[in-house]
Amino acid sequence: MDQFKGDKNIILDMNKIRDVLTDDGIAAQVGISAGIRKLLLNFYERAQGDLQSFQKQIETFYNSAMDRASGVYKRSSQLIVFIISVVICASLNVDTINIVNKLWGNQEALKHTADNLQTVVKQVNEKGYNPKTDTIKFEASKVTVIKNIPADTSKNAPNAKKVAQQISTVSTFLVSSGIPVGWTAQNTPDLKGKTFCQSLLSLLIKITGLLLTAIALMLGAPFWFDLINKIVSLRAAGKKPEEEATTPTKNTTVTVKPVG
């Protein structure tokens, strides 16, 4: 609509708007391309001389276009996130089916992992961790909550070497927490002495477990942290009512006991 303002910064009447839209030269002078001019002429005819209707049609078209653009962006970003998730899960061998089988069949390991998880969540929550603005830095046997992380710029964005180091430390942390991950003999299919069909089935189960983890990873940290909080709340009997989180001034460090 700013393209249709006169000398006194007042929007022109519909007759003058028509003059702009019906003249290629005038339209070009005010910065209206040929394609947009045809679109606006269509809106002008529908408005039948009503300026508010003309502006409303422009708003509706713009909002609809942005909705379509957002949908395209969301689908594209989901594909990219899925590919990244698959790479991470394959690198760390985070197999949902294998984790469930190992922990379900070992009650001591399951209790150890649940205790570690409950300790981490409790101590992290005490410092008012916000998954949308904060981050958790993983180290060999501990996690550190870092508050209010600014958006990465080209100067401090992590490179491939830093990402590889982060993946390695996350893997070490998960193992120390009692979660069976990593490409160890215990976490890879044993194909010795098996028939072709049995070997194929084992490989399919492994791929399925990795894909399940990748799909779960796409849901994002805020979703899973909220879900873990609910599970921990159910596990911890007699939890006190939640109190208002205070703003910490220092990073929070949580130590996880290694298995064994």
Image (cartoon, rainbow, N blue to C red):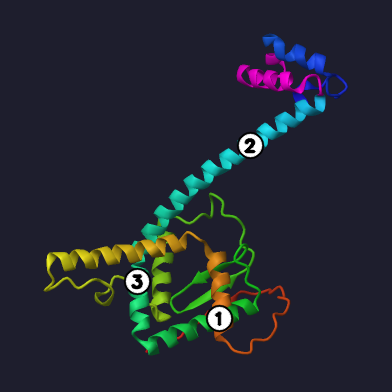
Amino acid type for the residue under numbered disc 1: Val
Q: Quadrant of the C terminus?
A: bottom left
Tell me the residue at 55%/72% (across/down).
Answer: 227
Q: Are marks 2 and 3 in contact (CB under 8 Å)?
A: no
Residue at image mark 1: 232
Amino acid type for the residue under numbered disc 3: Ile
Disc nearest the viewer among 1 and 2: 2
Tell me the residue at 75%/31% (across/down).
Answer: 56
First reached walking from the N terminus: tag 3 or tag 1:
3
> Secondary structure beneath disc 2?
helix
First reached walking from the N terminus: tag 2 or tag 3:
2
Crowdedness of circle 3 by 10 Å Cα count: few (<14), some, many (20+)? some
Above-or-below relation of 29 to 233: above
- Snapshot quadrant of residue 215: bottom left
Give the residues drawn in magenta, as a range.
27-50
Q: Is residue 111 left or right of residue 27?
A: left
Magenta residues, dominant SS class: helix
